[in-house]
Image (cartoon, rainbow, N blue to C red):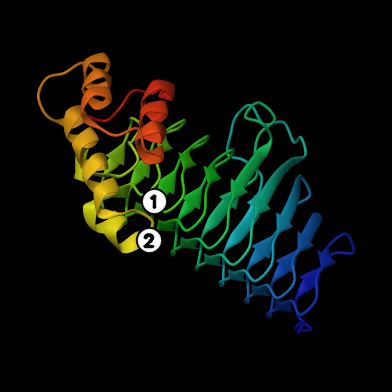
Amino acid sequence: MIHPTAIIEDTVQLGENVKVGPYAVLKGKTRIGDGTVIEHHASVGSEFSDVSIGRGNHISPYAVLGGPPQDLKYKGEETKLVVGDHNLIREFVTLNAGTKAGGGVTRIGDHNLLMAYVHVAHDCHIGNHVVITNTTQLAGHVEIEDHAKIGGVVRIAQFIRIGQHAYIAGDSVINKDILPFTIAQGNYAKMRATNKIGLERSGDYSKSDIENIHRAIRSLLTGARTLEEALEDIEAKCEPIPPIEYLKSFIKASEKGLAR
């Protein structure tokens, strides 16, 4: 299970049936959950970070998890990287630990796919069932909610929030929040349409739900309404089902503005 060339410091805790490949390096205050596979030349943990990796993850060659944040304010404080269960982390992915000023934790949920060369900076929070495609770069404090799909070579500015079931087209630049259930594209990206196909494929929403969501998205993206006018239109035209209430709360909570 543990290749003889792997370097594992005494501070590292390994669960049951963990596999560690040749020349992998595990160091610092690091815990690896049951059944996780760490392939050759991967690096997990550092002298500065507290790293928790859950169960059943697969960490590919040359991935670096738990390195110190790339932040000029960081002065070597112990901060955290928390990774959930059953994530596939491909080659050369980098996941930085958090910063004290940003809450101290970078968090990855469950059942995510992070493709090759993805960078997740300090204090980012990624939900569950998220796909992030090759070479996409997240600045600090980005939040990506459940079931979002991010195309390749996407650049996401700091403090951006991307809602559930959003779809970001490849080669986009995101400098404002992306609403749940939408498709966004461009440099700088704008929300273009409802992600109807994604919603249908998820199996989580009825036809009536999707029609209500689409009606709400159209109120926001068509015409020249202010956000206040769009919210009034949604109240008038859409049933108060949970996804509509979530959409309205997302709009009201946005601090970076909406990409429309």
- Is 103 placed above or below 204 here? above
Q: Nearer the viewer, residue 217 or 7?
A: 217
Q: Please state if 78 lies on the left or on the right of 43 as rendered.
A: right
- Is 260 placed above or below 57 here? above
The single residue placed furthest to the left in the displayed view is 223
Tag 1 near tag 2, CB within 8 Å? no
Q: Please state if 26 lies on the left or on the right of 12 as rendered.
A: left
- Graded by Cα atoms within 10 Å as few (under 14), some (14 to 19) or many (20 or more), the crowding at tag 1 reads many
Q: Please state if 54 lies on the left or on the right of 110 as rendered.
A: right
Q: Amino acid at mark 1?
A: Ala
Q: Amino acid at mark 2?
A: Asn
- Is 179 placed above or below 57 here? above
The residue at the point 35 percent across, 43 percent down is: 155
The residue at the point 62 percent across, 29 percent down is: 102
Residue 164: image location, x then y, percent: 40, 45
The C terminus lies in which quarter of the figure? Answer: top left
Report the residue marked by disc 1.
148
Mark 1 vs mark 2, CA separation in Å = 15 Å
- Quadrant location of residue 212? top left
Front of the two marks 1 and 2 = 1
Which tag, 1 or 2, sits closer to the chain's start? 2
Residue 15 shows in the view = yes
- Quadrant location of residue 215? top left
The disc placed on residue 134 is 2
- Secondary element type, mark 1: loop
